[in-house]
């Protein structure tokens, strides 16, 4: 099937935005279960994804949403945590970033999938307005599998944002404990 290119921006391969970030889990990174704090992992995920988005568009970016973070297996103290992030799909100015989190028991060498995440970033110009981004071309089987689900995730994301806006419109900004 021939790809129709609507943009003048040359498409990029998913691997061109690849970010690999590895950290060791220390006691100060863990919770009372002796596993990595979920919030700490979410910080790592957002950091890797933001570098990935910047690498893809080479402009300012902003996190539009953290679409999902699925914690699949706990990451224990003294294990390593390796994040692999790449642009899995794009819209006109948005980039869906897939982040795969792999933990490793550094004593045994056992590696396991600890989490997956999808985030959306928007490319901005100097005035803070959205700008067009290059589309992506998946190559590996994993990239193709992730890319194939992008349209369904985009529709779900748009529906979730619509629901969030409706909920937000009904919420109060008053601080009842100050009354």
Image (cartoon, helix red, strand yellow):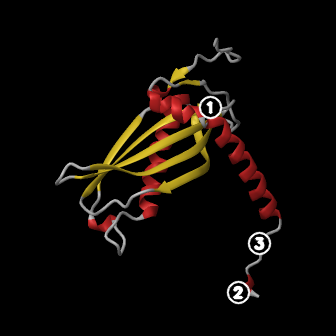
**Secondary structure at numbered mark 3:** loop
Which tag, 1 or 3, sits closer to the chain's start?
1
Q: Is residue 78 above or below residue 90?
A: below
Residue named by callout 2: 177
Seen from the viewer's position, the closer of residues 55 and 2 is 2
Q: CA distance from mark 2 to mark 3?
A: 12 Å
- 29 left or right, relative to 125: left
Asked whether residue 173 is in view, the answer is yes
Total numbered labels placed on residues in the image: 3
Q: What crowding class fits label 3: few (fewer than 14 Cα within 10 Å), some (14-19), or many (20 or more)?
A: few
Seen from the viewer's position, the closer of residues 48 and 103 is 103
Residue named by callout 1: 90
**Secondary structure at numbered mark 2:** helix
Q: CA distance from mark 2 to mark 1?
A: 44 Å
Q: CA distance from mark 1 to mark 3?
A: 34 Å
Q: Residue 32's x, y, as percent?
A: 35, 75
Q: Residue 116's x, y, as percent?
A: 47, 49
Q: Are marks 2 and 1 in contact (CB under 8 Å)?
A: no
Which tag, 2 or 1, sits closer to the chain's start?
1
Residue at x 64%, y 11% (from the top left corner): 2
Q: What crowding class fits label 2: few (fewer than 14 Cα within 10 Å), some (14-19), or many (20 or more)?
A: few
Residue named by callout 3: 173
Q: Is residue 134 above or below residue 40?
A: above
Q: Locate the C terminus and report the quarter of the image it occupies.
A: bottom right
Residue at x 51%, y 41% (from the top left corner): 98
Q: Residue 27's x, y, as percent?
A: 27, 67
- 17 left or right, relative to 178: left
Q: Locate the N terminus and report the quarter of the image it occupies.
A: top right
Asked whether residue 123 is in view, the answer is no
- 24 left or right, relative to 53: left
């Amino acid at each position: 099937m021939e790809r129709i290119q609507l943009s003048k921006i040359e498409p990029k391969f998913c691997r061109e935005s690849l970010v690999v970030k590895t950290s060791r889990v220390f006691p100060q990174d863990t919770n009372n279960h002796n596993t990595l704090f979920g919030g700490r992992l979410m910080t790592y995920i957002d950091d890797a994804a933001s570098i990935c988005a910047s690498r893809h568009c080479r402009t300012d970016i902003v996190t539009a949403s953290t679409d999902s973070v699925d914690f699949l297996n706990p990451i224990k103290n003294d294990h390593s945590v390796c994040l692999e992030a790449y642009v899995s799909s794009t819209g006109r100015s948005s980039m869906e970033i897939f982040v795969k989190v792999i933990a490793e028991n550094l004593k045994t060498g056992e590696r396991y999938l600890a989490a997956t995440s999808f985030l959306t970033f928007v490319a901005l110009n100097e005035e803070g307005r959205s700008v067009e981004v290059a589309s992506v071309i998946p190559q590996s089987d994993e990239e193709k599998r992730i890319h194939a689900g992008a349209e369904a995730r985009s529709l779900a994301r748009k529906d979730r944002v619509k629901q969030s806006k409706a909920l937000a419109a009904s919420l109060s900004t008053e601080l009842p404990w100050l009354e």
